[in-house]
Amino acid sequence: MVSEVNLQGALQATASRTTGSSRQRRSLNSLVVAEIALALVLLINAGLLIQAFRALQKLDPGFRAENVLTYDISLPSAKYTDNQQIAFFEEHLAQLRALPGVKAASATTIVPLGGHSGTFFEIENAPPKAKDEQNPVVLRRHVFPDYAETMGLTLVAGHFISDQEARATNNIAVVVNEMFAKRNWPKQDAIGKRIRYPGTNSSWMTIVGVVKDEKHYGFDQPMRPGVFLPYHFSPFGRMTIAVRTFNDPTALIATIRTMIQKSDSDLPMFGVRTMSERVQSSLWLRRSYSWLFGFFAAVALTMALGGIYGVISYTVSQRTSEIGIRMALGAQRSDVLRLVLRHGMLLAGIGVVLGLGGALALTRVMRTLLVEVSPTDPLTFISIPLLLAAVTLLACLLPARRATRVDPMEALRCE
């Protein structure tokens, strides 16, 4: 019969032998902690980036992209005078509006997400500027009537440029966006106010409408002050045509191309894209690095779980004799289970603490990318560590359960 003294001596001797590889175990433990910390950093930042991407998709862009086809037409100046350019685009838009399924059609020099054309404007009766105050660059777009309806802009005040106003040769009517109005008349109504290009020889233009700011430069980019001018005021040879339809706008491409060829066989129809495609294209970079972060986070998580499973399995195999002797001394299977799980969760806890610090540091660098999302979003910083801890617990459970099946008699025979 084995005495308790002999069992205790065997336990001490076994423990002494298993600690002979303590340096190796510390290295393995450090590696697992680093893997868990890295996985948590990547998971938290991937979660924040994906949240930011989804938030951007839900933002109101200030225009309605669905069922809008856009394409470019460039009239050569050697062939078309200003009046001929006006006549061509007016005729082309009239033909478009007559097509079945077309709800509205217009043209502009730049559609949302389509680029920038900046200039300066002088405000009538504007107070003197401060010493270091600069005149802001204003986004300028020349448009045909019906542009607001075609692009789905939201009027805040007044009305958009009518066909009659577009043809006027004096008292030019213009429309500004909210940012332009708030910057220049923060406590006044902008309707009826006048602006002009810098210079005493420039004609004053009257504001007849104010539209809601649109995400012209991208869903995550700030908007500039903007002004819409009538195309007839200053004709351009190259224009982007916008067509809003009741159904899929791409079904009209072949018809429109044929229509252009009949008007002028030398004119190409190029830059054909729907506004929905423009929106998706503007978001592709964010979508790419959001899912790229997610991919690396998944790889890091897999490595971390594999690492902690391997370390716990290795520890159990090295401590099989010790565990058997403990059970012979009266330890219950639940005690052995807690012993093994405690080791694994201790490693996970250290990794989570280090990972939280790393995640906080990285979010400071990525702050500009986290549009509409707080860099320290409580839900993300609480739920992901808890989820990681739960998955780590499951990874430790299998080797821990294996440890509870150690036969004490077999361990004692080995001793």
Image (cartoon, rainbow, N blue to C red):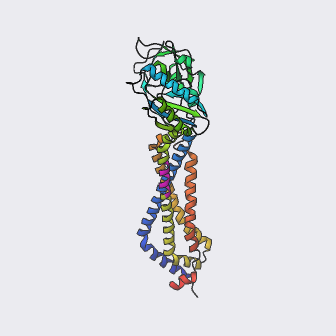
Q: Is residue 54 above or below residue 261?
A: below
Q: Quadrant of residue 77?
A: top left
Seen at 45% across and 59% down, the residue is 34
Q: Residue 294 lies in magenta, yes or no?
A: yes
Residue 143 in view (yes/no)? no
The image shows residue 337 at horizontal and vertical percentages of 59, 70
Dominant secondary structure (helix, strand or loop) of the stretch shown in magenta = helix
The number of numbered badges drawn on the structure is 0
Name the residue: 48% across, 65% down. Answer: 307
Q: Residue at x 42, y 72 (%)?
A: 21
Is residue 27 visible from the viewing direction of this image?
A: yes
Q: Quadrant of residue 60?
A: top right
Along the line of sight, which residue is nearer the eye, 155 or 364?
155
Residue 278 relative to residue 27: left or right = right
Looking at this view, is 226 or 173 the one in front?
173
Q: Which residues are magenta?
A: 290-298
- Where does residue 179 sit, x and y in percent of width and height? 52, 25
Which residue is situated farthest in the left direction here?
78
Instruction: Determine if the magenta segment contains residue 61.
Output: no
Height in image: 102 above or below 34? above
Note whether 265 is above or below 334 in the view shown: above
Q: Residue 413: horizontal and vertical position, in percent?
A: 53, 86
The quadrant of the picture occupied by the N terminus is: bottom right
Q: Nearer the viewer, residue 111 or 18?
A: 111
Q: Position of residue 296 (x, y in %)?
A: 47, 55
